[in-house]
Amino acid sequence: MTPTGAGTLHGSEAVAVAAERRWAIVVIAIISLLVATMVFTSIHWASMPPSRVETIDPRNLHIAGEFVESNLGTMVDADGKVVVRLIAQRYAFEPQCLVVPAGVPVTFRATSTDAVHGFVVDRTNANVMLIPGFIATFTATFDKSGERLMPCHEYCGTGHQAMWGRVQVIAADEFRAKAKDGARVSCVPR
Ligand SMILES: [Cu+2]
């Protein structure tokens, strides 16, 4: 091998240095992109938290307030918004069967009376933890009519595997007819 003079590169050495520099630029670009993504999402989420923190006393929510039995189920608010209220308790959801309109944003308000439960509607991104003392709120739109399962997906005790409910997605007109005059709608047989 012939020694090279200071400052000048020859042949394969020059190729290797150029390749190293190219890959250094690629790696720095990837790291910068990841850091920029982290900074953007943290600033964005800090200004727009995923859900508001609303608290409730789990010891007396059956007796008074928003989550009394007569107020559970789906209803149309005064401003036309479709709202579902439900509670989770060992080992059932109340109501066990929800009715929601298709193609309309539906706001869920739910809480737990005892342990931490998980609420999920299959084949949708409606998925939230129900924690005693806190009201979970999210909005989802169900595109297609039909029946969906709604299992508890957080281990909550020995009866956990039997804790599940159903969601019936029905045509919006049919839903409006059922929910007129502020009626609470569910598909629990009475
Ligand atoms: Cu549960």
Image (tube, rainbow, N blue to C red):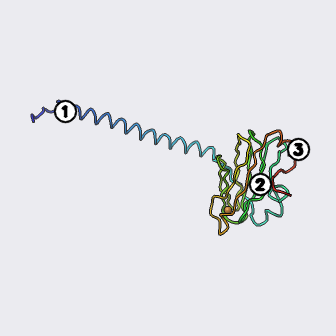
Viewer-proximal residue among 128 and 137: 128
Q: Which is nearer the N-term, disc 2 or disc 1?
A: 1
Q: In this view, does 128 lie above or below 159?
A: above
Which amino acid type is shown beneath numbered disc 1? Answer: Ser
> Residue 179, percent across and down?
86, 46
Residue at the spot of label 1: 12
Mark 3 Cα shell of 10 Å, populated few (<14), some (14-19), many (≥20) = few
Q: How far apart are marks 3 and 1 (CA)?
A: 81 Å
Q: How many labels does the image show?
A: 3
Q: Which is nearer the N-term, disc 3 or disc 2?
A: 2
Cβ atoms at labels 2 and 1 below 8 Å apart = no
Quarter the C terminus occupies: bottom right
| Disc 3 C-beta below 8 A from ligand 1 | no
Which amino acid type is shown beneath numbered disc 3? Answer: Lys
Can I make out residue 8 in this image? Answer: no
Residue at the spot of label 2: 97
> Residue 74, percent across and down?
80, 49
> Residue 169, percent across and down?
75, 45
Q: In this view, does 116 lie above or below 127?
A: below
Mark 1 Cα shell of 10 Å, populated few (<14), some (14-19), many (≥20) = few
Can I make out residue 31 in this image? Answer: yes
Q: Position of 4 compared to 111: left or right?
A: left
* Ligand 1 visible in quadrant: bottom right
Q: In which quarter of the image is residue 55?
A: bottom right
> Residue 49, percent across and down?
63, 47
Q: Position of 131 compared to 42: left or right?
A: right
Q: Quadrant of residue 26?
A: top left
* Closer mark to the observer between disc 3 and disc 2: 2
Q: In which quarter of the image is residue 151?
A: bottom right
Residue at the spot of label 3: 180
SS state under label 1: helix
